[in-house]
Amino acid sequence: MMRRPAVVLVALAMLVAAAAGTREKDSMTIIDFARGDAIWPNINDGVMGGVSSGRMVAGPGYATFQGTVSFENNGGFSSVRSPAVVHDLSAFDGLVLEVRGDGKRYAFRLKTDSSFDGVSYQVEIEPPAGKWTEITVRFTDFVPVYRGRVVPDHPQLDPSRIASFGLLISRQEGAFKIDIETIGTFRTPDKT
């Protein structure tokens, strides 16, 4: 008679473990500046004669993308981009960013190759000033762009080929600052 409670306890433990495993697979942290992930290099409008400045610096448990956008010399943008490492994120529905903004609008960008130039996929984010915020974006929300213009006939984002992540600020003159802690994935649970 003692066997039945033991079997029930083992079965219950297996169910709990399986449920925990499922939850873990519903999300994954890709970039975590608190664990010391690499700071991203900058790409500013100096590549075309502008004088905007911006860079990413390490903070206590996060990274800060900060600088100044200037319209001088036909400039007007600053950006940072992670080194290219291909991630297959096709098992997920989108990305979750933990950020603290300054009230300005930023483009969160993805690239599916390691080229310096070329098409990126972007979605606009506008985190409130001074408050840590979780921003969720679906892969289907990303729009293909090239040098700030939408590329209407370009294929949609392929989440199985995400090579780099980036932030861009443009057309907003003056100082800017956005903190980023993590970038992770999410998957909407099946509704069966």
Image (spheres, rainbow, N blue to C red):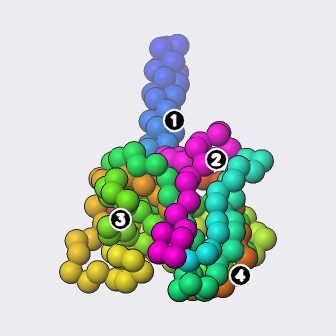
Say if residue 165 shows up in the picture.
yes
How far is disc 4 from disc 1 in space, using C-alphas? 52 Å
* Crowdedness near tag 2: few (<14), some (14–19) or many (≥20) residues, C-alpha within 10 Å: some
The percent position of residue 170, horizontal first and vertical second, equals 56, 80
Q: Earlier in the sequence, mark 2 or mark 4?
A: 2
Name the quadrant containing residue 171: bottom right
Check contact, mark 2 vs mark 4: CB within 8 A: no
Q: Amino acid at mark 3?
A: Asp
The span from disc 2 to disc 3 (Cα, nearest Å) is 26 Å
Q: Is residue 37 magenta?
A: yes
Q: Is residue 23 visible?
A: no
Q: CA distance from mark 3 to mark 1?
A: 47 Å
Q: Which residue is mark 3?
A: 117
Q: Is residue 157 shown above or below 9?
A: below
Task: Name which of mark 2 and mark 1 comes first in the sequence.
Answer: 1
Q: Label 1: which residue?
A: 16
Residue denoted by label 4: 174
The reply to whether the C-beta atoms of the residues labelled 2 and 3 are less than 8 Å apart is no
Image quadrant where one finds the C terminus: bottom left
Compare marks 2 and 3 and give the one earlier in the sequence.
Answer: 2
- Which residue range is magenta in the image? 27-49
Name the amino acid, label 2: Phe
Looking at the rendered image, the disc whose residue lies closer to the viewer, 2 or 4, is 4
- Crowding around mark 4 (Cα neighbors within 10 Å: few <14, some 14 to 19, many 20+) is few
Q: Amino acid at mark 1?
A: Val
